Image: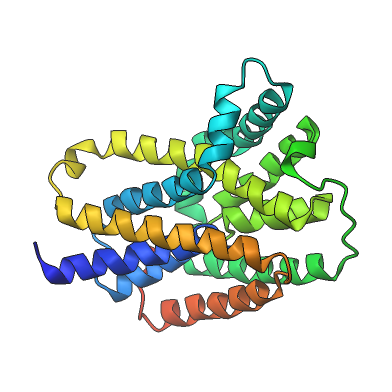
């Protein structure tokens, strides 16, 4: 096994794990890191499937007790049935729109200006959301209605725009709808399971021939680093939101948006290749 390749896998796994569940868009960071590491060829793109799967499993592991209780009682518990229905309904808008417009979005919106604009606009939206009077109407995910779930699902669909951030859209959207910080953050985590899970399965089926010919050691390192970093990030974010707002991520998004523009127009990163 090539130690340089393993190091690149380790770094990209950490980048995925640290950015997937924060409101800062993992896609932009993976492109930047992959290009700087010289890991944006076809193998690098396939590798993203593995590290995304590691991040998904981190959510499953963190909430394993809750998920097991929900699944095991779904035939008898109205609470469990409502929770599963809410997650399913929230998943549908992005799934449907993604199926219909994925190729169009990739052709017309996956460019430096669009990605940078999404980062910067998202940052200003966070500023605006945090300056609003936040009245909690939904203290926990179990208090969400089907209407709440559908609205959040529609908001999540905005993440089809590169640079928007799925986590950012659902968490900030939840706050604007009256969810508590914990409820908005946790529902974003739960919603990631079907959203990222289906996307990962689709990519595995699509790229199976290529996947079979890749280095298993690289896959293992990337998966493990993504899982561990995502798990630690989830734990950290749940503690962070108890005493902090999301303003720091607003500043970060704006700065990163500027970085996207600078690296694109100076040729340091070949964003157009994606």
149 horizontally vs 36: left or right: right
Q: Residue at x 69, y 47 (%)?
A: 155
Q: As displayed, is residue 91 above or below residue 246?
A: above
Q: Residue at x 80, y 68 (%)?
A: 130
**What number of labels is visible?**
0
Q: Residue furthest top?
A: 75
94 horizontally vs 132: left or right: left
| Position of residue 210 measured from the top left corner of the image (x, y, whole percent) | 18, 43
| Position of residue 53 measured from the top left corner of the image (x, y, whole percent) | 38, 46
Q: As displayed, is residue 152 above or below residue 145?
A: below
**Res 42 seen here:** no
**Res 246 seen here:** yes
183 horizontally vs 132: left or right: left
Q: Nearer the viewer, residue 190 or 42?
A: 190
137 horizontally vs 130: left or right: right
Rendered-image quadrant of the C terminus: bottom left
| Position of residue 273 measured from the top left corner of the image (x, y, whole percent) | 34, 62
Q: Residue at x 69, y 65 (%)?
A: 241
Q: Quadrant of residue 2?
A: bottom left
| Position of residue 106 measured from the top left corner of the image (x, y, whole percent) | 46, 51
Say how the picture is coloured.
rainbow
Q: As displayed, is residue 21 above or below residue 265?
A: above
Q: Nearer the viewer, residue 9 or 269?
A: 9
Rendered-image quadrant of the N terminus: bottom left
Q: As displayed, is residue 5 above or below residue 98?
A: below
């Amino acid at each position: 096994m090539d130690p340089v390749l393993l190091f690149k896998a380790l770094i990209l796994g950490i980048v995925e794990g640290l950015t997937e569940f924060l409101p800062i868009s993992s896609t932009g960071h993976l492109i930047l890191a992959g290009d700087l590491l010289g890991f944006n060829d076809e193998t690098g793109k396939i590798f993203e499937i593995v590290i995304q799967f590691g991040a998904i499993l981190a959510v499953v592991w963190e909430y394993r007790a809750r998920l097991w209780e929900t699944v095991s009682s779904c035939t008898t518990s109205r609470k469990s049935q409502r929770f599963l229905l809410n997650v399913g309904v929230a998943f549908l808008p992005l799934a449907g729109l993604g199926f219909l417009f994925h190729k169009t979005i990739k052709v017309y919106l996956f460019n430096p200006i669009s990605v940078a604009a999404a980062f910067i606009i998202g940052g200003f939206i966070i500023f605006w959301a945090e300056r609003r009077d936040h009245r909690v109407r939904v203290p926990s995910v179990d208090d969400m209605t089907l209407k709440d779930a559908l609205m959040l699902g529609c908001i999540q669909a905005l993440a089809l725009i590169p640079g928007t951030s799925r986590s950012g859209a659902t968490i900030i959207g939840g706050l604007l709808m009256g969810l508590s910080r914990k409820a908005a953050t946790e529902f974003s985590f739960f919603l990631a399971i079907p959203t990222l899970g289906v996307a990962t399965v689709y990519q595995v089926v699509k790229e199976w021939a290529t996947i079979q010919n890749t280095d298993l050691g690289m896959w293992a390192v990337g998966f493990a680093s993504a899982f561990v970093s995502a798990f630690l990030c989830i734990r950290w974010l749940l503690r962070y939101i108890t005493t902090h707002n999301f303003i720091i991520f607003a500043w970060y998004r704006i700065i990163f948006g500027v970085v996207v523009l600078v690296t694109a127009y100076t040729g340091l990163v070949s964003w157009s290749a994606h």
